[in-house]
Amino acid sequence: MTTKQYTYKFRIYPNKEQISFLDEQIGYNRFVYNFFLERAVNLHKNYNIKTNYYTNAVILPLLKKGFSFLKDANSQSLQASLKNLDTAFRNFFQHRAKFPNFKKKVNTNSIEIPQHFTIDGNSLYIPKLKSAIKVKLHRRFYEFAKSLKITKKPSGKYYINILVEKYDYCAYIPNKAVNGVSGIDLGIKDFAVITTGANISNKQSNKVANPKYLIKAQNKLKTLNRQFTKKIKGSKNKVKFRKRLSIFHERVANQRKDFLHKLSSRMVNDSQVIVLEDLNIKGMAKNRRLSKSISDVSWSIFTGQLKYKADWYGRDIFTVNRFYPSSKACSTLGCGYNKQDLKLSDREWTCPDCGAKHDRDINASDNLFLEGLNLTIRPERSELTPAEYAPAGIQNTGYSRHTMKQEAHAS
């Protein structure tokens, strides 16, 4: 029986004494992380020597002798910091992330507690702290907790992330019908245009408005930034306004996460097959006019949520090649006309072959929807050659023109 890792996140409410303790523990781990990061950079730059977790773990006891305050830290948490640094380097060398950065006190910081913690009701007990920290368990969990991470946000709020293992005994099946197909065309003007249905006769296209949380909050954000820059460095007012600014940013981020979670959950509940385009988000973000809007819509977070929720609920997600002409190809069955001269400013166009009038975005989602039907109706290869697809996260290599007969879609 296979298992999957899952993380529960809860907010904790430490008192002043506990806040002082947590800040000290976070500081110890930040110090160790930065020390070994600087050491790794210097050794590689001056002597071409590479380090890893095991070479650093040998030196950690010596570091404690040189810096006696580290004796008050949880030793397992310090070891976890070394593992995190090792992971950061491996992600960099495997081109999955940027080069590791030094941790700053004003940013989000955390400590990991692999063992010897207890959650009893609404009380959290951790090593080296005698009193219990109040935790708000907004939902119960019954799995075995493997490890615990305490995170401090720049806003001053504290959270715990509890890593558990869940048995993959069966997929969760919602009450709604799961034989539906959805084609999702992501955009900026509208966050997404979604075409959903079980066949051609009952498909529906809906536009999901872009909430634009960051753009709507821009004026307030500029005011806070202006006030923050005027404060004297190191003053209490500077600290106070930094916290106000962090709280504001966190609220915008929470609004965005809430919207993305609700939409992704709705899509997974309504559809068995979901088809997306493989967007070049990094390349699009380099456009100065669109970079802020692209970062605000958070396409990558949304697609990531779709993929892990689809994995949990037994759904199928497919991505089509980024060069697939979803907007340019006529979505009318049997037509297959491709309007090569379609510009980004052309929001509507008429097919010269069949005379169908298309909304650019709805036409794109319809094409993705039809590709989803190709997968459910014709999973085998045929003379019509449906699109070459790969599982979620892996790009496919081609596209089809929807030349199948309409009666093939009958329910």
Image: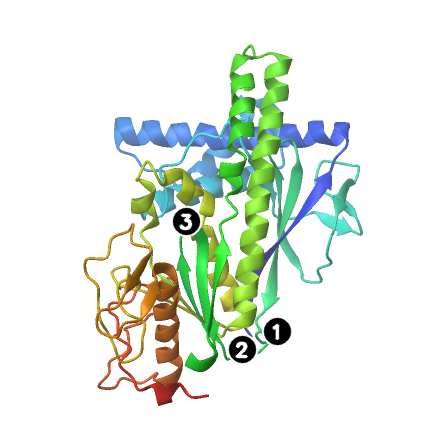
Residue 178 is labelled as: 2
Q: Nearest the camera: 101 or 128?
A: 101
Helix, strand or loop at label 3? It is loop
Q: Which amino acid does label 2 sit on?
A: Val
Helix, strand or loop at label 1? It is loop
Viewer can see residue 123: yes
Contact between marks 2 and 1 (CB within 8 A): the answer is yes
Per the model, the C-alpha gap separating discs 1 and 3 is 30 Å
Residue 231 is labelled as: none
Q: What residue type is labelled 3?
A: Ile
Quadrant of res 128: top right
Q: Nearest the camera: 171 or 290?
A: 290
Where the N terminus falls, by quadrant? bottom right
Q: What residue type is labelled 1?
A: Pro
Q: Residue at the far left: name it.
A: 340
Viewer can see residue 312: no
Per the model, the C-alpha gap separating discs 2 and 1 is 8 Å
Q: Position of residue 219 (x, y in %)?
A: 52, 29
Q: Residues within 10 Å of mark 3 (few under 14, many from 20)?
A: some
Q: Looking at the image, is mark 2 or mark 3 nearer the viewer?
A: 3
Say which residue label 1 marks.
Answer: 174
Residue 188 is labelled as: 3
